[in-house]
Structures are given as C-alpha cells and as structure tokens.
Image (cartoon, grey):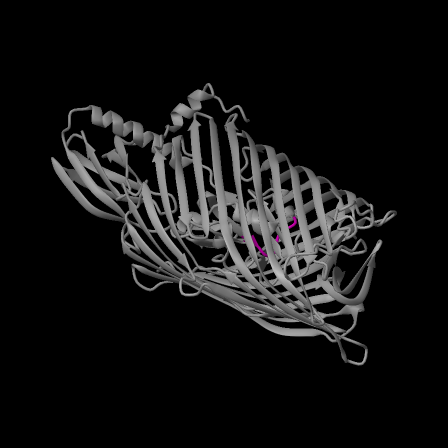
Amino acid sequence: MKQLFTFFVLLIGTRAAMAQDPATHLTGRIVDSVTGQPLEYATISVFRQKGAKPATGAITGNKGTFSLDGLAPGKYTLTLECIGYETKVVGPFDLADKTALGDLVLSKKVVEVQGVTIRAPGLVENKLDKLVYNVEKDVTSIGGVATDVLKKVPMVSVDIDGNVDIMGNSNILFLINGKPSSIFGNNLADALQTIPASQIKSIEVITSPGAKYDAEGTGGIINIILKDNKLKGINGNISLTGGSRLENGSFNLNARTGHFGMNAFFSGNAQLASTTLNSSTRTSYDSTGNVIGTLTQNGSSSFYRNGFESGVGAEWDINKRNTLNASLGFDNFGNHNNGPYIQGQNDTLSLVNSVSQFRAHSVDWQLSYKKTFARDEQELDISADGSEGNNKSSYTQSQSLPSGDSTFAGSQGVSTGQDHEANLRVDYTQPLTDKIKLETGGRIQLRRITSNSPVYTFDPTSHLYPYDTSQSNSLTYDRRVYAGYVSMNFPLFHWLDVKSGLRYERTETDATFSQAPGTNIPGYNTWAPSIIISHTFAGEQTLKLGYSKRIERPGYRSLNPYVNASDPKNLTRGNPFLQPEIGNNFDLTYSKSFTSGGELNVALFYRRSDHDIQPFIVYYPSFVLGDSTYTDVSVSTPENVGSENNYGVNIFGSAPITKKLNLRSNISSFYRYITTGTLGGEAIRSFNYRININATYQVAPTLVMEFFGNFNSARNEIQGRYPSFISYNFAARKQFWNKKASIAITTTNPFEKYVNQATVVSGSNFTLNSLRQVPYRSFGLNFTYKFGKLEFKKDKEQNQDNGGQDLGQ
C-alpha cells in the first residue's frame, strides 16, 4: 500500500510539474540488474537538496524510460522504487538544462515470508506451506486453458484425459479463490477446460496443508486464483483463441475508485469434435484356466465439449481496518459423445450404437468481511459462501444386426440432479509476540444432493422403451461437516521455524438410495494434525520437513448402488459400504534461489493411503439386474482395496542459461506399493516417473518462443497397467502496440495425429486388452489486448476521505 500511495503522489506531482514552464529536461531508464530488461511501472521520486517531500516524480512505461520537465536547475537526489525490487537512491547530482542519467539498475528484493526467505515473485514461488505458479508471468500459456497450465506446474501431472494428480495421488481438493465450487464435483476434466489460462492469476499447490485448510483431499490442494486488480482506474483485457482443436475467449474488466472496486469477467471455450478409435478384447476363463469366451469391440467415438463461465465481484474498503468482499459467478459446461462399434462374442457379431451427453451449470456466491487491528498480523475473517448446481446426463444404446437392422436390445437413461452447498467460516489470527502467532477458527459445511435417474429398456416385442423399475434410481444425499482448528507459528531453538496445528472434523451423512433402502452411513470423527519445521540457511537456502493427515470422503456417486448399463457388457455401480480413505503425507523439501534468477526445489516424499478407494472389476458369466439378465459381463465397483504407499522424489529446477534463454524442468519418480487387503491376491509393485522440460527464448523484447515437452510413464494399479503418455508443443508470442497487444501461435504434437493408449487389466477369471487412439494434434492462434490506464492517489487524500480519522480503531 505504501508504494501505491507513492504512485499517487508521483502522478499528481508529475502533472503539476508539467503544468509549469519547462526549465530542465531529465531522462533515464530503469532496468533489472540481472536480465537488463526494462522495468514497467517503476516510480521515480525527485527530491531537492535537503527536501523532505518529493518535488515531482514519474512512472516508467513499458520501455522502462522516464522523462521529467519543469525543475529548476540545482542539486537533486532520486529515489527509485518498483514492486519486488530494492529501493535505490541516486545522487545527489547537479541538474543542468538537459541531464541524461542513462540506465539505472534495480536489484530484486529478498523478503521474509513466515520464516522462509524468497526472492520477489518470479514464475515459481516456494513458500512455507505452498508452491505458487504465477501464470501471469508464463507468457506462452495465454492461449490455453487451466489443464494446459497445470501440466507446467511443479509436482503436478495431467494425463491425456485431463485427470490431475499431485506426486501420484489424484485425490485432490480443488478450490477457486480459496473456496470450493460444485462445478468440480460434477466433471473435473470438463470444469478445468472451462477456465482459460488468460483468466488465471496463479495456481497454488499445497502438498502439506496446515490445520486452517479443509482436511479433504489425500493428495493435497490445488487453489486456482483468478485475476483481479487492486489498482485504481479502469482497465482490463480481451483474449481470443481459435484453433483446430480448442477455441476460447475471455474478457476481464476492472474498475476502482476511492474505497470501492468492481471486477467482471466472461469466458467461453469449445473443444471441437474429434474422433477417437477404440478396440478391446476381453477373454474369460473358468476355474481351471480354460477359455470360456471372448468379447471384442471395435469402433469409434466422436467427442466434443463446450462451456462458459462469468462472474462479478466487488470490494469495499469501509475504512483502513474493515473490508467487505462479495462475488457472484455462473458456470455452464458439458460434453457430447457418440459412436458405433462392432461387438463380437463367440463368433456372433452385432452393431452397438451409443450416445451420451452431460450438461451442468452452477451459481457460486461469496460474501466475506475482514477486520485488521492496530497490531500487525492481527485480523478477523468471516465468510459465507455457497454453490447451487444443476446437472443433467443422458445416454442411449441399442444393439442390432451388423447391418443396422432388427434391433434386439437397448436402453435409455436420463439423470437430473441438484447440488446445494453452503459454508460458513470464521478465522482469527492473534500475534502473541513478534515471533509467535496463533491461528484458530471453524467451519460449517452443509451439502444436499438430489438425483432422479429413470431408465427405459428396449422391448423387442413392442419395439418400445418402457420404464424399467429395477434399473431406475433416485437418491437424496445430505452431508454435514463441522470443523474447528488451532494452529501456531513459533521459533524453536532460535534456528528452526515451526508451524503446527490440529484440525477436528465431524462428518455426518444421511443418504436415501431407491436401489438400497435402509442404507445407513455412520458418522465419523477425523483428527488431522499437521506440522512444518523449516530452517533457512545463508545463500537463500531452505530446508523444511512437513507432515499432514488428510481424508478422502467417498462421493455420492461412489456410494450410490445404482447400476449404469449404458454399455451392456461393462456395467458400473456404486458401493454404499465404502469407508473414507485416510492419508498420511510426509515431505522433506530443499529449495534454493540463485542470484542469477535460477531456482531449485527438491522434495523427498512418502504418502500412505489406508482404505484406498479404487475401482475393482469382477467378471460374471451371468449377472441378474431386476428382470434383466446380462451375460458375459464385467462389473466395476469402487472398493476399499487396502493401502497404497508411494515413496519418491520430485525435482524442479529453473536456470537462465543466457539473458535470453531460460530452461525449466520438473522430474518426479516414485515407487508404488499397493496391498490388496480383503480382496486378496498379491501386492502390486511398480516404479513410476514423469518428466517435462520447458525452454523459453527471448528473441527480442517483444518476441518470445517456447518449447514444452512432457512424458508420463505407464502406471500399475490394483488390477492392471495403464498407458504412458507423451506430449509436446511449440509456441511463439509477439507483442505490439506498446505491449498492450500480442499474438501467439501454438501447436501441440504437430507430427503425430494420434496418441496411442494401450491398457491391460486382469482379474481372477478374465483379461482385458484395450487400445484407444486419441487425436491430440492441434494448432492455435491467440490474440490478447490490454486496455485502460492506472490512476493513483496520494496518502493524504485517502485520509481526507475518512474525514481525517482512522475509523477502524
């Protein structure tokens, strides 16, 4: 805020000086001490000899230059300031008629954040309890979506279907601006596709969440921070992307004056229709190992998705100590999938036509109040937020002769649901001494889900689809979570910094399933301790040890015993007897920042999940469902399979090879050991690794080129081996119109049309081999334009707005 008020002084002072008759001409340029790049929005305060207040000042433009007129000749000093850089004093010097100071260098500031020394924000920040990826500084991600950005974030991996994991664990709690949203509960991959990268300010990865965070998510937390703007004035940006596979656009508008500010945004996206080739062979065996049947499926499916999101937010600084925030958001997204395939069973062929679609929309709201006190870091936060979601999914499948005539089986299903969630949070921070801080608070979460899913099965006699009572389903799901926590930051032995806490959560669930009346889901208590111990060494080095206990509550879809028969040979159903998964996460992390601008982050980790929830496939020669009997069928059901143990290391490094070339890489490798628990069988062991490399070359001040490559090894789960995945993309971005506009060209996997995904799954009496050929090649063109200007007010004027009094005291 101090720098912001300084900006006000300088802007008004500059205008006053320009109104005078010019007497002198003072020029210069502000640059980074390491890269030599010009610094935009740096402030220059000009002081007369022995003067206590600036005589005038300036703000640098996109080329880092400044020019001042109207000062009387004499002796002056300059104070140079820029956010994230050390303040520098130049002079005293004699100001003549024309004085050119040339390049003036500023060094990046080294700051203390909760006991961890870090440099001013770069692309990646390593804080005490989180890693922050500043998307705004990734100039070539601008044309993509959240999924594309997550591929570049250290410790995070994304597969070809958009599934995300943190160091091998996909049970992640996703937040937007620190708050949950029902859009993530419907279809995570689709939800992430609706958020353009141009809308994201930063992504926080929290691998060892403290007691203040919800205990949900055994893999950790990913918090997506959307853009806002605290600077006064009216400004915004427009971003449009067109391509062969992905299209999106976004619009952001920010306005702030006095103590009130507003922001609004709209973004839309579409993944154009693409056809995936599918083939599979399932072989079944009897108890002696003899083959009793073979099922083949060969065909294609056309898939596309689209959606949009919009929102408006407001912030009111009631006075120096009290602030109100409110926001309202709307999301709408969905997908469509259809395609025929030939099914062969014991030399009998049939044609299966399948169509499925999904649509969801939600309204998210949030209201929060913050009060700060005269003592630094003492504050009270009260917030209420909620989400109202609606979704609809449907499918149609029919089986006929290979010619398409004489339909003999089929079914249709429609599922409509509502998801209502409300949260009330209270957080209070109290510094006990200069180095000891206490945090405490609580949360109440209320969630209610209702769903109705009628199913209609084909009657070969009437050729109609009458209502099927045995397969139709409805549910009501109420979950309440009551939580409280206490956390403390304190030094230990004068050389360790400790942040420890304990969180308690009580979960109560009432569920009514039409297919399993009388199901009782018992409530349970969760005690979730956490601790981070860190030490900072000379040379910007930090070593920290973290532990946290996490929980993964089974969702209502996993609990619902409803059987989905959209594929009559591969059924899926829920399991009302699932227990919550419990995670214990340990991390030992070393990080170092180099004066050249490089970064190194090495994390050793051990993650154990008990009552691990995984889908488990069982083959049935005959499976009875109501009045229908399915033959030669596999049924997938989520089960608590035992425990999953991951031991590994994650290494992230960034190095400026030259002033123009920068390399970044993220390497993760881990050994996975899965016990099968009550399911029986041998334990599963596998070695997994992921690696990506990102090279950025600054061809010119307004032209940058980038290469990004990513490889995920195959992984073993409880019943099979899932495929490896490789992707790579090239991008170039050119800025113009004084860096207010840019054009970016991107391409992904330009030399290969398909990514082949071969999967092998087996059980006690079957093996399944499948191959998907996913079209992944794409080309895209992005245009971005920033508009508006920044205005600043000086400190004195802000006090006058409050009548000269601090109303918060």
Point 63% across, 44% down: residue: 438
Left or right, 460 with reference to 757? right
The answer to whether one can see residue 116 in this image is: no
The residue positioned farthest toward the right in the image shown: 518
Point 33% across, 30% down: residue: 9
66 and 216: which is toward the camera: 216
Q: Position of residue 527 (x, y in %)?
A: 74, 52
Seen in the picture, residue 736 relative to 274 is either above or below; the reply is: above
Q: Tally the marks.
A: 0
Looking at the rendering, the stretch of residues picked out in magenta corresponds to 205-212
The residue positioned farthest toward the top in the image shown: 803
User: Based on the displayed image, in which of its 4 quarters is residue 760 positioned?
Assistant: bottom right
The residue positioned farthest toward the left in the image shown: 97
The quadrant of the image that shows the C terminus is top right
Q: Position of residue 1 (x, y in %)?
A: 43, 35
Q: Position of residue 674 (x, y in %)?
A: 70, 70
What secondary structure prevails in the magenta region? loop
The answer to whether one can see residue 496 in this image is: yes
498 and 471: which is toward the camera: 471
User: Based on the displayed image, in which of its 4 quarters is residue 567 positioned?
Assistant: bottom right
Residue 211 among those drawn in magenta: yes
